[in-house]
Amino acid sequence: LYMGLTMDLVAEGGSARLLGVGRYGLSLSGFSIEPGVSYFRGVGSLLAHGATGQLAAVEKTGDILTLKYTHAANLVADYFKTAFAVALHETKTDLAHWLDIAETVVTQERADILQLIALTQSAPRVSWHTIGQLHGLSSAAAFDYLRIHEQLANILPKDQLPRVTLLVLKYAGGDYPVTTWLNGLMSSLPLMANKEREHLLQLLERLDDVRLAETLVASVPNLPMNDWRILDAWLSGVFDFGARQHPTAMAYLGLESSSSVEHLAALCGQVELKDCLRLLQFYTEAFVGARLRLVGRNDPDAQGQTLAGTDGTVIVLPELASDYASRDQNFRFYKVALLHQLGFYEFGTFDFRFENNPLAFTAYFRRFNNPSLASLLFQLLEDARVDWQVTNTYRGSGSDFNWLKGDALARRETVITATDTGRCLETIVRAGLDADEAPQSQRADDADAPEIRRLTQTLRVVGASVWNTMAAVRDCYALIVRLSPAADEPSCWLEVPQQVSFRGVIEPDTISVNLQLGLLADDDLDLVDDDAEKMGMSMMLNPGDVDVDKMKQAELEGAGMLLKEMDRLPDEISEQTKKETAADDEATLKALLAGRVAPQSAREFHYDEWDFVINDYRRRWCTLFEIREVDEDPEFVDEALQSLRGLGARVRRQLNMLRPEMLAKVRGQLDGEELDMEKAIEAIVDRKAGLSPEERIYVQKQRKVRDVSALFLLDMSASTDDPVPDPDAEVVEPVYVDPDSDDYLRDYYA
């Protein structure tokens, strides 16, 4: 390599230049030839491009590196390779900045110089002048920016990249690292449209603290990034609501404070499920009782369901309703979506029974050559029936349903179907949304649309049941197969219609199984692998095997209902079907039960909590766990009363000092203001039987009740964090003192 450079070196600087380069390269090769090889190759590149004026600066920093890492041949070789690459492709000023950074890094850890070399090779388009400025403010910020620069350059247009660079420079001059903010930025930017990125940059340019910028970036998924009017007004609220202090501003930008969430909701018109969950839960209980619990899509009980739906134990709704301009409209969406799910229970969707089979829907759909098509038809037709029955029965909901149906139809105007089956299914959906005809683009190809609409409209009459839906499934299936014989094949690809937002999806057999098992469960719906559940499975698989004489009374009542329901067979269907094999039914049922999640015994409730630091409520900050099943310790109460006997004596003395002032009825008296009816009847019966009658047949009103109310508040806030002398003591122990005193004084308590 060196001999190949001799002519050029002599031509440039004579023999002195030749010998100087040779001696320097030789000094690098004391332990390995790799550093010398990299050096001579770099010199050759500089000679070829007429840039040897940069050589002295590269050698100067190389001397510092070689002196510190004499034996690190590979490290030295990589340095020269990288330095010469920068010298060739960057300006003299940029090279100077790079070498300044390298000199500083060389004095630190070996990992730092390795990191600089690696990042230099991965960021060929970076401005080393900018990196030099960053490095002067924070070496960590410089490396962080180097790490993401190429990715930023690929994502951002040319006018936005310099603005991000200026933001990095601004935040790097602060007291806090920019690493987390940059990582969050890189997670958000690729998912955003150019307009949304522009809005984000405008917001960040108004924040001077990287911690606030970090919090804002984390909130991006929950912000309407495409609407600058809302974003501008919301960010201004940081100052309008007195959030200038850092903790308050952090809570505001993180959508943790009540004022921030309410301000954004007012600007967007959006409604969060958690804000109206309690009201909707009461609404649910008014329809179907307390068995069904409302949860959001992110709740563990939602089982990953992304659309509205139900499984017989919970109803799943979206976490956020924000498709409409006002809060009223978004709340109406929640109400209609909930009413649709409740309608399945109210109007008997899961009353369907077929062939004494617990998986009645699956059994019925298997009667068709293409069960998938039959199942899809049922979903679409039953959705339409339920909506119509809800509005027929609850007239007040009609305006909400009509508005959302109209909106759903407007969103379907651009829907294009490619197959005859797809057109038929789309016609069913549109008919269920009260459309009079197909969209303009499909009318020429829709000769059978009137018949499909007529079949769908049969479910609109008052009192239409799930049996009418099954009849419509049969007729629509026959019509579709006549139009497209391929649809009758199990392997046929189905063009599934676009989902109607407020309807969601259901798995009817899963729900039906859960509801049937619920009949045999206790009041808490504690479904475990016990004898009761095994018996329930046995009854559903083969009701004839149940020995009624050996059943308990409570089980008998539920079982009787179950057996009666499962014996309901529609004549028109049972005549054209036959029983499937029990083995298939049992396998399918067990598969459903295997994935079934029993309702949790410990429910979570979230409450806002006041934070004096930010002078505002933090949203859903406090979590209360309702635990119904606790381990009992019979000796705990006795031990607690024994340890607190002094306190108990003082409570008894104080309660005993209160004179009873409230009247209480005392039965079985010789005289009084009214008859004790039970004692009087017993006396008459005794007299008729020739026995000596009881004379104490009156009721007196005596002053025996103390007007005392006591409320125990177990305060677990920061103001009660003083150490407890006995680490084994429990905070609930004093609660038992008052009931014990009431027992002693014969006072009533609850």
Image (spheres, helix red, strand yellow):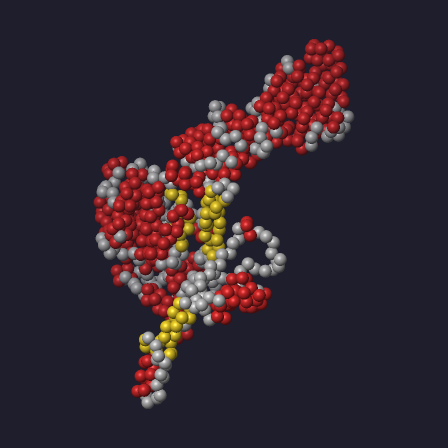
Residue 407 falls in image quadrant: top left
Residue drawn at 50 percent across, 65 percent down: 654
Q: Position of residue 431 (x, y in %)?
A: 26, 45
Position of residue 151 relative to residue 651, above or below, is: above
Residue 231 seen anywhere in this rendered image of the structure: no
Q: How many marks?
A: 0
Q: Residue furthest bottom?
A: 690
- Camera-nearest residue between 285 and 468: 285
Residue drawn at 47 percent across, 57 percent down: 626
Residue 643 falls in image quadrant: bottom right
Quarter of the image where the C terminus is located: bottom left
Looking at the image, residue 236 sits to the left or right of residue 2; the answer is: left
Residue drawn at 38 percent across, 48 percent down: 276
Q: Position of residue 91 (x, y in %)?
A: 60, 17
Position of residue 204 relative to residue 354, above or below, is: above
Looking at the image, residue 131 sits to the left or right of residue 451; the answer is: right
Position of residue 446 relative to residue 103, above or below, is: below
Looking at the image, residue 363 sits to the left or right of residue 303; the answer is: left
Residue 238 seen anywhere in this rendered image of the structure: yes
Q: Position of residue 126 (x, y in %)?
A: 57, 24
Quarter of the image where the N terminus is located: top right
- Camera-nearest residue between 684 and 65: 684
- Camera-nearest residue between 126 and 723: 723
Q: Position of residue 113 (x, y in %)?
A: 67, 29
Residue drawn at 39 percent across, 58 percent down: 291
